[in-house]
Amino acid sequence: ANIVLLPGDGIGVEVVAETRATLDAVAAQFGHSFSYSEHLIGGCAIDATGTALTQETLDACRAADAVLLGAVGGPKWDNPSASVRPEQGLLALRQGLGLYANLRPIRLFPELIQASPLKAERLADVDILVVRELTGGLYFGKPRIREEVNGRRRAVDTLEYTDEEIQRVVELAFRLASSRRRLVTSVDKANVLESSRLWRTVATEVAARHPEIRIEHQLVDSCAMRLITSAAAFDVIVTENMFGDILTDEAAVLAGSLGLCPSASLGDGTRGVYEPIHGSAPDIAGKGIANPIGTILSAAMLLRHSLRLDKEAAVLERAVAQAIAGGARTADLGGKLSTQGMGAAVRAKLA
Amino acid sequence: ANIVLLPGDGIGVEVVAETRATLDAVAAQFGHSFSYSEHLIGGCAIDATGTALTQETLDACRAADAVLLGAVGGPKWDNPSASVRPEQGLLALRQGLGLYANLRPIRLFPELIQASPLKAERLADVDILVVRELTGGLYFGKPRIREEVNGRRRAVDTLEYTDEEIQRVVELAFRLASSRRRLVTSVDKANVLESSRLWRTVATEVAARHPEIRIEHQLVDSCAMRLITSAAAFDVIVTENMFGDILTDEAAVLAGSLGLCPSASLGDGTRGVYEPIHGSAPDIAGKGIANPIGTILSAAMLLRHSLRLDKEAAVLERAVAQAIAGGARTADLGGKLSTQGMGAAVRAKLA
Ligand SMILES: CC(C)[C@H](C(=O)O)[C@@H](O)C(=O)O
Ligand SMILES: CC(C)[C@H](C(=O)O)[C@@H](O)C(=O)O
């Protein structure tokens, strides 16, 4: 299999290197051989080429079976009036590959429940899969304007959805729910937004085609609350791009650390982009202390979804669970292991 | 003083009635007399008049010193293709009165810390004031479209801000921070949205005029996370309309119940609209068990901001704190008191 690595910026570089070593260990164990090619994206791509995603990187990703990504961005490129930004690389990649669904599972390691800011009794049975729409909404709608006219400045972003865009991602959420607990929570702001009213209408139509699965509609503000008060009540959550961005960072708190949470961005085929949900973490970049688990678990999703290596994925996930059960902890979990130390602890549980 | 009451729908009716009785007790104690007039808004206004906010209600609010509001909405009016909605009444009221800033304090009663889903040690010293922009952004931007063309449906909402809209609400946040802990966290999504870049630029300009107050900029996704992991680190949060809607419902979890949280919607003068941040709660409406504390504390904000009765406001807030310290609990707090029982418990601590 042909895997493109896009380490990106900050700790992205460190966690992707560690995950590659771990993928190699899985390959060795099962007699596979993965070939990797590494490309630039984000801030490092801007520095080298002037653009956050080159045609060469995009072409390489299109030709690959799967893409493993670290993170993009950092203070170096954080200037409100900059004309190119690291994040554009990520958005262009998602759009260029047609990856309209971002799967973000929130699962808890029993040994880490005590590390959570939430009381243990609130965390029993939490197992949530957020399906975030990824190529529509405010992130991509036109027009996007920032202008100054007669000394007065204004800016515009556009939240636009078509029925097709909503339908395909909600349909995927229902398919995923059918092998889980059969509940889809569709999150919108239908009491205020036109786009949310269309969202709710289309979600209701999709639900009618899946009578064996329950749907509930929830307003985004109350969802933000219920994620903390009643997390165990959720199974699959499906929502638009911006709401999904906010709710998944919030939900990651349940897991005890953002550093543990993986994601898969999928489209119609099997190719996908796999990345941890954390960012480039400039405050700890280069120190070798970032938690690689979010990326390693993203690699497990890669094995499962893009390479159809279900058994290998399960073995890797079990190794992660055993390493954590065995006490392996990076700094974000209150421990002392380095990025490499955590990767090694996982690899020690393979085999 | 001339106070307009807008009970609205669902539990709005119950909590406003209880709060009026409590305001009367404050008035009696201090020798004031408040005159009330009650008007329709939301679903009940639609039923009676076909529109969610009549000109008569708006005129009455314009002529009043302050407005106390319950909640609007309910399943009866929840039809994605309805042409009038209860929420439009609330939005039109905010806009019609020029109430561009919604203040939502998040404060904890020590006796309720055990009721929170968060661990007690995460809640020490939490005292947050969220200032939510209230008359701009996605809620009001044009165009708003929902259409079907050749069998394909699409919908559009528009997120628009001018520099003036941002400037006035951020300026208010800085003024409020100067008598608090002198930290303003400005929340945006400047790595993706043009409107957020303008927001960040203007917030930075306002900050330069207040060198004695620290500003920090935070992305909305990480703010959603930090509100749970590090709530005590925040002082004043200022953000745009939709982000503020989501983050304040989330932050209300810290207080232990949405039913406890008040809000004040203010413009340039002293007139304001005061309402709890909870909604109409159709599931418990009419049962007489809703928690009136969010509305009673909103009335305390009314006394302070609109009537300039600082002492009376403080006495009312202290009575609430003492009632809770004395064990008064409605169902949302795991207790048995009715709405009236909770109101009576507060009034018993006045004097
Ligand atoms: C970096 C940014 C553009 C991105 C997003 O908002 O999608 C990130 O926050 C994420 O959640 O993957
Ligand atoms: C009812 C709705 C329009 C309203 C809002 O989103 O502003 C409510 O959620 C609130 O927070 O006051």
Image (tube, coloured by chain):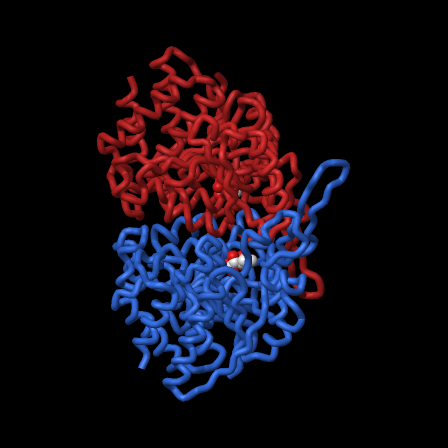
Chain colours: A blue, B red
Q: Is residue B177 above or below residue A247?
A: above
Relative to B31, A204 lies left or right: right
Percent from the top left, x then y, of residue A321?
Answer: 31, 70
Percent from the top left, x then y, of residue B285?
Answer: 38, 41
Q: Which residue is drawn at 63% across and 69% down?
A: A96
Q: Does any portion of residue A163 appear in the rendered image?
A: no
Q: Which of B137 and A259 is in front in this view?
A: A259
Percent from the top left, x then y, of residue B87?
Answer: 53, 42
| Residue at the right extreme, as displayed | A150
Relative to A275, A79 lies left or right: right
| Residue at the left extreme, as displayed | B326
Q: In this view, does A320 lie above or below B201?
A: below
Q: Which of B271 and A113 is in front in this view?
A: A113
| Residue at the front extreme, as displayed | A287
Q: Does any portion of residue B252 appear in the rendered image?
A: yes
- Quarter of the image that includes the C terminus of chain A: bottom left
| Residue at the bottom extreme, as displayed | A31
Relative to B28, B1 lies left or right: right
Percent from the top left, x then y, of residue B248?
Answer: 45, 42
How many numbered badges does the structure rendering display? 0
Q: Nearer the viewer, residue A117 or B141?
A: A117
Q: Nearer the viewer, residue B169 or A185?
A: B169
Q: Which residue is drawn at 66% across and 56% down?
A: A84
